[in-house]
Amino acid sequence: MRVAIAFCVAVLPLVIGITWNPPDNIVDFSLYQIYPRSYKDSDGNGIGDLRGIIERLDHFTESNVEAVWLSPIYRSPMVDFGYDISNYKEIDPIFGTMEDFEELLKAAHDRNLSVLMDFVPNHTSDQHEWFQKSLQGIPPYDSYYVWHAGRMENGVRVPPNNWVSQMRGSAWQWKDERQAYYLHQFSIQQPDLNYYSPDVRREMKDVLKFWLDKGVDGFRVDAMIFLYEDKRFLNEPLSGLTDDPNDYDYTVKIYTTNQQPTYDIIPTWRQVLDKYEQPKYLMLEVYSNVSDTMKYYHYGADFPFNFYTITNLTRNSNAADIQYVVESWYDNMPEGCTPNWVTGNHDQHRLISRLGEPRARAITTTVLLLPGVIVTYYGEEIGMIDEYISWEDTVDPEGCRAGKEHYLTSSRDPERTPFQWDDSVSAGFSSNPHTWLPVNEDYKTLNLAHEKKEKNSYYALYEKLSALKRSQYLKEAMLVTKVLDDYVFAVARETEDHGSVYAISNFGDTDSIVDLSVFDNIPSKLNVYYASAISDILPWESVIQIRRVTIPAGSVVILTTPNADFVTD
Ligand code: NOJ
């Protein structure tokens, strides 16, 4: 891998940055996560659905999105809003029918839009037929889940070990019918499948095949790291981070995550995918340390998701921190692989709510210019923010389980509110004024229709950058990043014959004057392609000298070389 850390003399005594030449074979597109309950409601019941997505497919074309990933739409009791599946081969009626899905797939493909499903292999719903049969001990289902008789402590039966569920409390649940505990690494209603069973492995490959035969383009794999547990069922060591044995962070997950067989199963899925003529993608949800994360690249996944902008940046981060985040992925990723950048999802506070708007703009700008796959969580293209949801309105199982005292720190409802299309009833999401989660109060001004009219809106920035990302010339262009000032970060994509683009983000409180001659191959004059601060300093389409460029506080500026072909290609 050609990652060079460059130190040059410029405005700052040291200008830190990287250069990276994307290999030809990497996957490069903009992927959009649809949370179907919240994208668009077509039938007025206050919950988003498949026909709603069909109605609003143009939004993806207009936003230069090349692929969408649908959070689960399978039949489900909806305890975890679809991540508890009771039938992997049916569409939940709340979202529509299989015919609706097929129509959606065709309409998407007609627009050259790939469709990825959410594959949830770690657990099913406790309402799944397999679990119901397992409960009754009916072969072969009796071994489909992780059952354990527990152990006796002072004459009382207790769970086999100290494993903790992600949703608080013991990861074991007793069942009288079976006279045993079952493992659930998430909610009680999400029993973990037993991957040591060949029948389970076969069933899940069959699920992949079912959707691939329908024509889907790949999968986001949910909760990848939890697939296998160590068979000895030993206690996990205490982390020392908290005294609360019900807190997920109470133990270090050496027996319940990233077990070797979890890696080994990926090539068996890859084999299923590779039987199809068109490329099929496998993207894994992995929150782990760097080495455990990067290891997934070696087993046939396109990539483990890169959550660094979520886990490693804060409201206080400076430009060097952003540089470090970018560099860390390139430095640690195996050679020839596809980088990727996820800035938000349905489990994390929204980007702007986490980092504040100036830093969020800087991150959006940066990732959209990075090679590889970038993942936009619905609503982030218009800069949606978290909404306060009261305890009475809380529906997320993680929030509910935390209780009234603690739900605000655990609930994922704030980042799941309906998409804000316009300023009409329920932000144009639904004709129903009552939606499954309340619409954010700011929708009258923060909505897509409004932002389309504003030259410097969040959406305008997103749309401009995603147009650049789509350009074939830029997909092949060399990446150069630079820290230009404490709070000024620059990312450039340079081509030899088709021009170059430079995006400079100043997320500090004061204007900053930067010297862009620190970029080796830069011409002396550049065109202003976009400037988020409307000012006389950098009018759009003006030409500027590169030696002293004023980047207004809290703004983003995108500059192109005069010979830039990609602006129109
Ligand atoms: C990760 C998903 O993103 C999250 O929403 C879900 O609750 C858990 N996995 C369990 O499926």
Image (cartoon, rainbow, N blue to C red):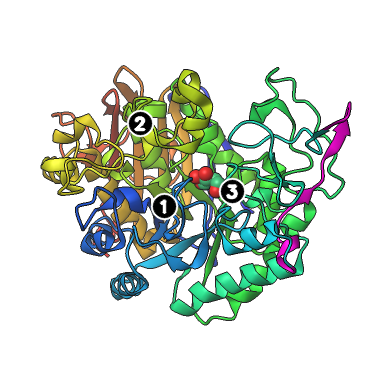
Question: Disc 1 marks which residue?
Answer: 494
Q: Is residue 358 above or below residue 347?
A: above
Badge 2 crowding class, 10 Å Cα cut-off, few under 14, some 14 to 19, many 20 or more, is: many
Question: Disc 2 marks which residue?
Answer: 352
Eye-nearest disc, 1 or 3: 3
Q: Which residues are magenta?
A: 139-156
Amino acid, disc 3: Gln
Residue pictured at 49% horizontal, 79% vertical: 213
- Of label 1 and label 2, which has the lower sequence position? 2
Q: Nearer the viewer, residue 252 or 163?
A: 163
Query: Is residue 32 in the magenta section?
Result: no
Residue 450 shows up from this direction: no
Badge 1 crowding class, 10 Å Cα cut-off, few under 14, some 14 to 19, many 20 or more, is: many
Residue 401 shows up from this direction: yes
560 vs 415, left or right, is left
| Alpha carbons under labels 2 and 3: distance apart | 31 Å
Eye-nearest disc, 2 or 3: 3
- Helix, strand or loop at mark 3: loop
83 vs 360, left or right, is right
Q: Please give the count of numbered marks on the rendered protein.
A: 3
Q: Is mark 3 within 8 Å of ligand 1?
A: yes
Image position, residue 515 (x, y; %): 37, 30
Question: Disc 3 marks which residue?
Answer: 190
Q: Quadrant of the N terminus?
A: bottom right
Q: Is mark 1 within 8 Å of ligand 1?
A: no
